[in-house]
Structure formats: structure tokens, C-alpha cells
């Protein structure tokens, strides 16, 4: 009886150790896969059928950062536009220093109003030259192109990968009967429901 009792305890402990090790392995794998998926935000998604990488979401955000600086720098030379130009530079700085994907998404959305308010006031003023007005058009076309590429192609592709990962993770958690809380998951960069952030013709 003592032998059987000791043996049953040993089997139980072996099962517990194996289960804990399995959970640790699941969490370790989740961390690795999360990093691999979030890396796609910065590197772009490989299109196997076409044989090349799409430009990354981060690269388009960098375009928006660069253009917003040029736009604000042009406008801040005029006292009547200085306040709006400063607001654009603050919004641009928030996007530039955002570290996580979620923070970048929020900062990206918050770029819209300062830029549109600056452009509206600038184009309604009578202080700008024709050359400066043409520059505004070019800047806004670049912003429109970058945001359209993000919303129509890049963000949906990235979001679908995150969705698929979370779906598979949910199924695995149900099979193992473990909580999904505390398990690392990739951050979303969802496309906006109302279309591109900047739409300029």
C-alpha cells in the first residue's frame, strides 16, 4: 500500500510538473509569436504571391511625420498661423516618440485635426504666395496617399494576422482549459472605420 501511495504521488507530481512545463512553453511561444507579428508592423508583410514585402505601416507613419514637419515649418513663419503650426509640431512629436503600436495608433489619429485646422486656416488666409499654396497641396497629397495606403492595404493586412493569431490562441486556451489572461498578444493597428485619415483631392 505504501508503495502504491508513493507511486501515485510520484505520478501526480510528474503530471503537475509536465503541465506547468507545458504552460510555460505555451507562454514562451506566445511571447515569441507576438514579437514576430509585431515586427511586421515595422518591416512590412511579405506577399508570397507577388514575391515582395509591402511597405510597413511604420514607414508610412514616418512619411506623415516628415511631411507634417515641412508643412508646419512653412506655416509657422506667419504670426496668424503660428499657433496652429505649433499644434501640428506637438502632434508630430507625440507620434515620433510613441513606443508601442497602440501608442502609435493613437498618436496617428491625433495628427488629423491639427493638420486639417492648419491647412484650412492657411488656405483661407491671404498671406500665402501661390508657391506656398502649391506646396500645401503637395504636402496634403502625400499625407492623403500615406494614410490611404495604411487604411486600404497595410492596416487591414496586419489586423487580419493579429485576428488569426488571437483566434488560434483562443482555441488552444479552450483545449488546455487555461486562462488567456496574462498571455502576451500582439497589439492591433486597426483601420479607421471612416476611411483614410487624410482625404485630399
Image (cartoon, helix red, strand yellow):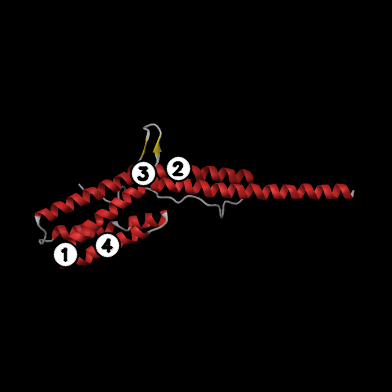
Question: Reading the chain from its start, which is encountered first: label 1 or label 4?
Answer: 1
Disc 4 to disc 3: CB gap under 8 Å: no
Say which of 153 and 89 sits in front: 89
Question: Reading the chain from its start, which is encountered first: label 1 or label 2?
Answer: 1
Residue 34: image x %, image y %?
A: 49, 48
Residue bearing the label numbered 3: 154
Disc 1 to disc 3: CB gap under 8 Å: no
- Label 2 CA crowd tier, 10 Å (few <14, some 14–19, many 20+): some
Taking 53 as reference, is 7 above or below it?
below
Residue bearing the label numbered 4: 89
Give the Cα distance between marks 1 and 2. 45 Å
Q: Which quarter of the picture shows residue 176?
A: top right
Taking 192 as reference, is 47 above or below it?
above
Q: Is residue 25 left or right of residue 111?
A: right
Name the element at disc 2: helix
Taking 80 as reference, is 65 above or below it?
above
Name the residue at 14% across, 51% down: 134
Question: Which disc number belongs to residue 33?
Answer: none
Name the element at disc 3: helix
Question: Which disc number belongs to residue 77?
Answer: 1
Residue bearing the label numbered 2: 161
Give the Cα distance between marks 1 and 3. 35 Å
Give the Cα distance between marks 4 and 2. 33 Å
- Count the labels in the image: 4
Disc 4 to disc 2: CB gap under 8 Å: no
Question: Reading the chain from its start, which is encountered first: label 4 or label 3?
Answer: 4
Residue 112: image x %, image y %?
A: 28, 56
Name the residue at 33% across, 55% down: 108
Q: Nearer the viewer, mark 4 or mark 2?
A: 4
Amino acid at each position: 500500500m505504501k508503495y502504491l501511495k508513493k507511486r501515485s504521488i510520484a505520478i501526480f507530481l510528474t503530471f503537475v510538473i509536465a503541465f506547468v512545463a507545458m504552460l510555460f512553453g505555451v507562454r514562451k511561444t506566445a511571447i515569441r509569436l507576438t514579437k514576430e507579428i509585431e515586427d511586421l508592423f515595422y518591416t512590412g508583410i511579405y506577399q508570397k504571391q507577388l514575391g515582395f514585402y509591402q511597405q510597413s505601416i511604420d514607414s508610412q507613419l514616418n512619411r506623415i511625420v516628415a511631411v507634417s514637419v515641412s508643412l508646419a515649418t512653412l506655416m509657422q513663419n506667419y504670426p496668424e498661423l503660428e499657433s496652429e503650426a505649433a499644434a501640428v509640431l506637438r502632434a508630430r512629436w507625440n507620434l515620433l516618440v510613441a513606443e508601442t503600436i497602440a501608442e502609435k495608433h493613437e498618436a496617428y489619429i491625433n495628427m488629423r485635426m491639427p493638420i486639417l485646422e492648419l491647412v484650412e486656416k492657411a488656405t483661407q488666409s491671404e498671406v500665402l504666395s501661390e508657391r506656398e499654396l502649391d506646396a500645401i497641396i503637395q504636402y496634403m497629397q502625400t499625407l492623403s496617399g500615406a494614410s490611404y495606403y495604411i487604411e486600404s492595404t497595410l492596416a487591414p493586412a496586419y489586423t487580419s494576422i493579429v485576428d488569426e493569431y488571437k483566434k488560434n490562441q483562443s482555441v488552444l486556451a479552450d483545449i488546455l482549459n487555461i486562462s488567456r489572461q496574462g498571455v502576451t498578444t500582439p497589439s492591433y493597428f486597426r483601420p479607421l472605420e471612416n476611411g483614410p485619415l487624410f482625404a485630399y483631392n
